[in-house]
Amino acid sequence: MGIVLLNEQPIVPVPDKGGSYIQTLKQLVVGSGDNIFYVDSQGSLWGGRTFDTAKAWIKPDGTFSFKDGSGNVLVDSAGTDGNFVNLINSTLNTQTKQILSDFTFGASGAIKIITDENNGIWISPTGILGKKAGNVTFALETDGDATFGGSLVAASGTLGAITVGTNAWHVDSSGNMWWGSAANYAAATYKIGADGSANLSGLTVGTNVGLGTAQDSNGVTTIIGNTVTTGYVNALGVTAGSVSANNVTAGTITGSTIVSNSDSYRIILDASNRRLGIYNGETLKGAIYCDGDGDLKIYSWDDLVFNVPIGYQYRFRIGDSLQQFLDNDGDWNPRADNTQKVGTLGYAYAQMNAYNFNDHCLWLDEEDDLAILRACRPKYDKNGNIRRNKDGKPELDTKSLPDWMHTEKELREEIEQKGHDYNEDEIQEMIGRNMGHFLDLTAGAVRQLANKVDALETKI
């Protein structure tokens, strides 16, 4: 039996204790540095004298930790990294969660990322399989085949060829596409080539065509050669050498010549001559024309009539000058006798110029014409000052005349009829004098004065 030495001194057996022991030993140290074995009341340590620096240690409470030479945890009762045991070698490091080399798996089910047998991903030597609720959502096989149960979305990609459905739609690697059961583009009947050529002979197109919707009353359009025959076209834009249609609705219509219809009377917009012409057959009957100076001219080879239906409150406004608006005799005539106005009470001309004005006069000798004239007074403003015109002359207060000599009644009727929105001050400004009646009144006053003179002369 060997001898145990303590500080180079042998431990002496104690017979009555049944063997040799050290009763008061506090520490045990064997070796030094990284090769030390150290024991005290806290536990046993290898490769260091503290639990932080030791490569391995065991405490009296049963906890432990073992590391490799690089400090990686191999076994740790605390499991601070989520595992009690870590495998660390050149192939696998469970502490850093790294696969460091190749692994060879079995025939199937080598790796499972699943929540249960009906949901998850399986990776095996034959491919990758995905399931949701027991249904296969995708499958990638090692022979290159792929199956997807949902939508396939990609920012870009390159495919050799595409086939959709059975005998439905095909695209080859050159960009040619065709429909039907043909094995290739050359044998197909309905096809569009990558060069833009198309073979769609006898094709009948329904609604929602990508080039614009063209359809007849049955919702069908027939396209043959260079001609589209249809009862209705709905498109963002139509470019054609000629368009023949009964009705065209569009924001902008551009063309060198636009013809309304082929009937006897029709309108032709001739862009080259800047003319909108009205025709009877092939005969031009009237036109609106813009000459080279930018003047707009209206021509008529028969009567030129501006007719506003009775009851419609429209106005025909004349510009700065009026050269001709005449009948065959050179006269400007109303629609009927004692109808129509030149200007209105609310829209009066600034000045009327003529050699003669003829009207139907009143005989006012039954009135006291002089008394009416004496009652005339000037117009005053809100401050009590006499209103004057631009020449400094006092203005006549038309309200000082009898009602039958000013236009207030007719003006208010016109305002109500045409729906004008004037305040009372504006209405008072527009009340005018009946010039014909005023001349009749003046003539009557002159006659009154003449009679008075005649009476005085008789007395003398």
Image (tube, rainbow, N blue to C red):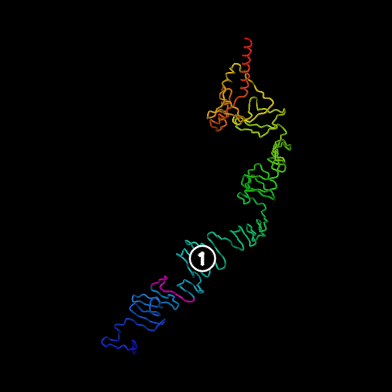
Residue 449 falls left or right of residue 31: right
Residue 62 falls left or right of residue 173: left
Which residue is rendered at x = 54% and y = 31% of the image?
425
Q: Which residue is mark 1?
A: 129
Question: Residue lying furthest left in this view?
Answer: 16
Which residue is rendered at x = 63% and y = 15% of the image?
450
Q: Is residue 81 magenta?
A: yes
Dividing the picture into quadrants, the one containing residue 248 is top right
What element does badge 1 sit on? strand
Amino acid residing under circle 1? Leu
- Vertical comparison of 416 with 123: above or below: above
The main secondary structure of the magenta stretch is loop
Of 140 and 402, the residue lying toward us = 402
Quadrant placement of the N terminus: bottom left
Of 250 and 386, the residue lying toward us = 386
Q: Which residues are magenta?
A: 78-90
Dividing the picture into quadrants, the one containing residue 147 is bottom right
Neighbour tally class for label 1: few under 14, some 14-19, many 20 plus, Cα within 10 Å: some
Dividing the picture into quadrants, the one containing residue 410 is top right
Of 180 and 429, the residue lying toward us = 429
